[in-house]
Image (tube, rainbow, N blue to C red):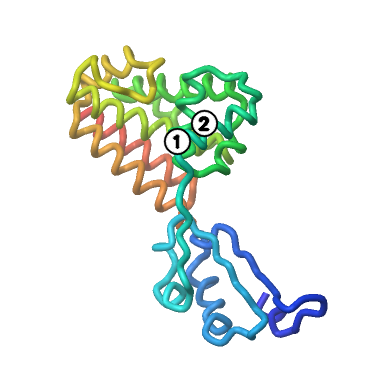
């Protein structure tokens, strides 16, 4: 890319380079950009797209102009999904898509088959409930689910986080608590009594740390297996 930048454009005034998932670049890759970022040709524009700009090294961030884009509102997300599915959706599906998208419109269009996702989420919740009882098979099942690639792995991670967030709400407000996983409320209530508020909070921290390490190119399979072990240790103490 650096070599290509040295050649002036033939058919336009600018040459634009877009680096997607820039926060997943290694430190070596980012350092390789530094020289061209310090003195780019006048006709070159480099756009680095990041979910978490803090993962860029300081020297790269200091040589770039940061532009933050606002997230879409909850109603805009819901409207986009209804249009995509031609209004053939139910309220539970709409609530899940809204929470999962977190204001990012692209996630709406990446959302998979609803029936398949329901099955996957049920498997994750069942594995978590088994994990709370200290079962090795449950941990093995959870790791297998986590090892699903692409969008499925994000759905699994989202379900993990929402599971423990719901338990925190249940620990504070009891059966009247507002939860994201309404279809699993009874299971959440039964499991939440064993876990409690502070253990659920610690589990969320473990999941967040694991997802950050994965975004920094940590070995995925090893990271999720370690996460499952730590979750089980916290939940069964």
Residue 222 seen from this side: yes
Looking at the image, which residue sits at the far top? 186
The C terminus is located in which quarter?
Answer: top left
Write down the residue under mark 2.
Answer: 78
The percent position of residue 66, horizontal first and vertical second, equals 45, 67
Q: Is residue 143 visible?
A: no
Above or below for 136 versus 28 = above
Secondary structure of the residue carrying numbered label 1:
helix
The part of the image, by quadrant, that contains residue 149 is: top right
Percent from the top left, x then y, of residue 141?
A: 46, 26
Residue under the point 58% across and 82% down: 36
Percent position (x, y) of residue 123?
47, 21
Cβ atoms under marks 1 and 2 closer than 8 Å: yes
Q: Foreground residue, 231 or 216?
A: 216
Image point (27%, 19%), residue name: 191
Q: Nearer the viewer, residue 198 or 92?
A: 92
Real-space Cα separation, disc 1 to disc 2, in angstroms: 6 Å
Whole-percent x and y of residue 95?
Answer: 45, 26
Mark 1, residue position: 74
């Amino acid at each position: 890319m650096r070599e290509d930048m040295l050649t002036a454009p033939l058919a336009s005034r600018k040459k634009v380079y877009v680096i997607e998932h820039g926060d997943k670049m290694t430190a070596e890759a980012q350092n390789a950009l530094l020289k061209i970022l310090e003195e780019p040709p006048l006709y070159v524009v480099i756009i680095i797209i990041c979910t978490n700009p803090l993962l860029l090294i300081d020297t790269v961030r200091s040589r770039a102009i940061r532009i933050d884009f606002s997230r879409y509102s909850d109603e805009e997300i819901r409207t986009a999904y209804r249009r995509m599915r031609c209004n053939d959706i139910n309220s539970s599906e709409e609530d899940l898509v809204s929470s999962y998208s977190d204001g990012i419109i692209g996630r709406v269009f990446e959302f998979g088959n609803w029936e398949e996702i329901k099955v996957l989420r049920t498997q994750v919740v069942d594995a978590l409930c088994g994990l709370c009882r200290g079962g090795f098979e449950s941990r093995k099942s959870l790791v297998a689910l986590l090892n699903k690639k692409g969008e499925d792995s994000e759905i699994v991670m989202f379900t993990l986080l929402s599971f423990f967030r719901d338990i925190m709400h249940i620990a504070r407000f009891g059966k009247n608590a507002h939860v994201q996983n309404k279809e699993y409320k009874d299971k959440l209530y039964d499991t939440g009594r064993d876990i409690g508020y502070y253990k659920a909070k610690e589990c969320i921290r473990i999941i967040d740390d694991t997802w950050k390490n994965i975004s920094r190119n940590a070995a995925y399979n090893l990271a999720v297996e370690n996460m499952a072990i730590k979750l089980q240790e916290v939940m069964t103490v």
